Amino acid sequence: MTRYSAWSVFKNGLQGQRNWRRAWRDPEPKREYDTVIIGAGLHGLATAYYLAKNHAARNIAVLEKGWLGGGNAGRNTTIVRSNYMMPGNRGFYEHSLRLWENLSHELNYNVMFSQRAHITLLHTPAARDAAARRYNTMLLTGSDAELWSLKKLKRKIPHLNYDSARFPIIGAAVQRRAGNARHDAAAWGYARAADQLGVDIIQNCEVTGFAREANRVTAVDTSRGRIQARRFGLAVAGSTSQLWAAAELGKLPVETHLLQAFVTEPLKPLLDHVVVFGVGGAHFYISQSDKGGMVFGGDLDWYKSYSQRGNLPAVADAAECATSILPCLARVRLLRHWGGLMDMSMDGSPFICKTPLENLYLNAGWNYGGFKASPASGWYFADLIANARAHPAVENFDLGRFARGVNIDERGAGPDPKLHG
Ligand SMILES: Cc1cc2nc3c(=O)[nH]c(=O)nc-3n(C[C@H](O)[C@H](O)[C@H](O)COP(=O)(O)OP(=O)(O)OC[C@H]3O[C@@H](n4cnc5c(N)ncnc54)[C@H](O)[C@@H]3O)c2cc1C
């Protein structure tokens, strides 16, 4: 397999670009594997990679019903940050950010990780106090965090709406090491690196059912035949409840909701950072892509759905938010918008855990935030599958936490998935 480098770009340029190899193979599924991961989104691909890399596991397949990275992995607004506060989340997301910082080297694939700073606008003294608590916790636990005065924010982003905003801006909470990455590149990088370690990535292979013997899964039924394995990992994000039902496991504390993202026509450089605006019912985040388009997202659609489509009320809502903080965007044309399926958990935190079936493991509940989490998610999910016990870092990401009363409710929104971002 070609190693990507400045030299390989130069050499292939001289050879008329004819000698590049496929980035990953397109193997026929075998009838039997040691480990089967269901879902070739970021979490499934990262899990396969770390299983092979960290645990020397072999004979692994990732089964994907469509094309790899075609789910939420390829539909998100690519924000990477670790500004979480609660025990459990704090260390997990910090580990993920650290993995992002070296991911291009680790995978030998440019994931275009850009640490351009994540700036949350503050509008009330109460929001500033809450941010101070969160960002001080981050500082005390080895991360980076800053609170900016209004004066400093004006110097950094002069064209925000400081004059006539319905909710005046009074400052900002900032994580400088946060930013964006290229979502497709992350999926392709993990796919290529996993493939190089011998993982079979089988696309167009939908899992439709589970064959069980007593408390174990013996095989999955797929659109390309039955595939047996010793252990199975479920990493299908917004489709989790459907496969949970197919495995006849009863009710799962996850609801699937739609989230949309938007991109405008390309503009000259306008915004160097990721900016988040959330007050008075608004929820909005914006950054500028390397091609110049303004990329932004808003809130959930407020109803459960598997449709993966955009709709006009969400466009109107996001446009209102955009123009209320950046009035200079008022005449900019929207180029595209799309929807993805959010696996919303009841406390807004994920699951990396065992299931009632002995050899079936669950990775789900990523809400709006699974892109940033994907390296750490793959890392710890691989660890769980390899060792059949949860790593201490994720031991509270289990299904039993609701019964034990140890919900990890970062936003304090209670068991109401549509309120958890
Ligand atoms: C509009 C939008 C904006 C977002 N913005 C951000 C952000 O800025 N930052 C952030 O951190 N997160 C963000 N997210 C969330 C993030 O994208 C997801 O949490 C994350 O991608 C989910 O994990 P995944 O990549 O593994 O999921 P997916 O890419 O959805 O992977 C699941 C895969 O499973 C496959 N699958 C489903 N059913 C089956 C089956 N029966 N058999 C085989 N395969 C199956 C699907 O086809 C899919 O490819 C956003 C999401 C959306 C939609």
Image (cartoon, rainbow, N blue to C red):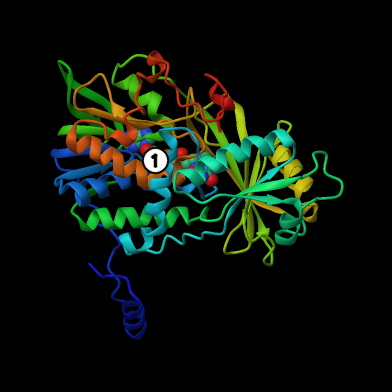
Q: Residue at x 57, y 64 (%)?
A: 290
Residue 139 image offset from top left, x and y in percent = 51, 46
Quadrant of image for the C terminus: top right
The answer to whether residue 1 is left or right of residue 237 is left
Position of residue 41 in the picture relative to residue 22 (left or right): right
Which residue is drawn at the image coordinates 68% and 39% (left, top)? Answer: 128
Point 24% across, 39% down: residue: 383
Mark 1 nearby-residue class (10 Å; few <14, some 14–19, many ≥20): some
Horizontal side of residue 181 vs 358, given as left or right: right
* Residue 33, above or below 328: above
Q: Inspect this view and state whether residue 70 appears.
A: no
Furthest residue toward front: 140
Residue 215 higher or lower than 116, as above or below: above
Where ligand 1 lies, by quadrant? top left
Residue in the foreground of this view, choosing between 300 and 93: 93
Tell me the SS state at disc 1. helix
Residue 308: x and y, percent? 52, 36
Using the rendered image of the protein, determine whether residue 317 is visible from the camera's viewpoint. yes
- Residue at mark 1: 92
Q: Position of residue 329 (x, y in %)?
A: 76, 54
Query: Disc count in the image?
Result: 1
Q: Amino acid at mark 1?
A: Phe
Q: Is mark 1 within 8 Å of ligand 1?
A: no
* Residue reaching furthest to the bottom: 14
Determine the residue positioned at 40% across, 41% down.
91
Q: Report the quarter where the N terminus lies.
A: bottom left
Closer to us: 313 or 156: 156
Residue 5, given in percent of the width and then of the height, sits at 33, 74
